[in-house]
Amino acid sequence: MSTKEQNTGWSGGKNAFGDFAPGMVHYTDKVLFDEVWERTDLSKRDRSLITVAALTSMGKMDQLKFHLGFARQNGVTEEELKEAITQLAFYTGWPNGMGAMSVLKGIIEEEG
C-alpha cells in the first residue's frame, strides 16, 4: 500500500477556488488527488467506478459530470458506464439513475 504524497500537478481545487478557500484547495489537490487517487491498492479505473457509483447514489450530478469524464480518461468505456448506471438505478433509486444517465448522455453528445 502506498500512502506517500506525490505531486501529480493536479490543480482542480486551485482552478475552482483560487485563494478563496485555501483549505479546500489543499485537500482537493494535495490530499484527494495527489494522495488518495495515487494509492496503488486500487486502480484509477476501479476508483473511478466506485466514485461514479457513490456520486450517483447521492444524486450529486454536478460532481458526477467531472467524474464520468475522468472515468473515461481512466479506462472505463462508454458502454461500461451506461451499464453501471443502469445497474445503479435499481439500487440507488430510479431518479438518481436517470439523472446520471442524462449527465453521461450530455457528455457523449458534447463530444459528438
Image (tube, grey):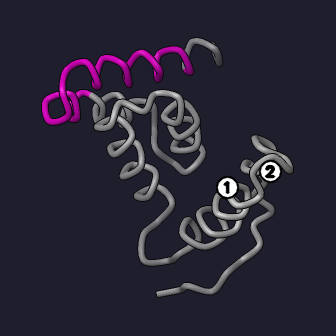
Residue span colored magenta: 86-107
**Residue sitting nearer the eye, 91 or 84:** 91
The disc, 2 or 1, on the residue closer to the chain's N-terminal end is: 2
Circle 2 residue: 14
What residue is rendered at 28% in x and 31% in y? 83
Residue drawn at 46 percent across, 44 percent down: 76
Measure the alpha-carbon separation of dots 2 and 1.
9 Å
- On screen, 11 above or below 37? above
| Residue 35 belongs to magenta span | no
Residue 96 placed where, x, y %? 29, 25
Q: Which amino acid does label 2 sit on?
A: Lys
Our reading of the magenta stretch's main secondary structure is helix
What percent of the width, then of the height, locates residue 30? 70, 68
User: Which element type, helix, strand or loop, lies under badge 1?
Assistant: helix
Q: Name the residue under label 1.
A: 24
Kind of residue sitting beneath label 1: Met
Instruction: Report the label total.
Output: 2
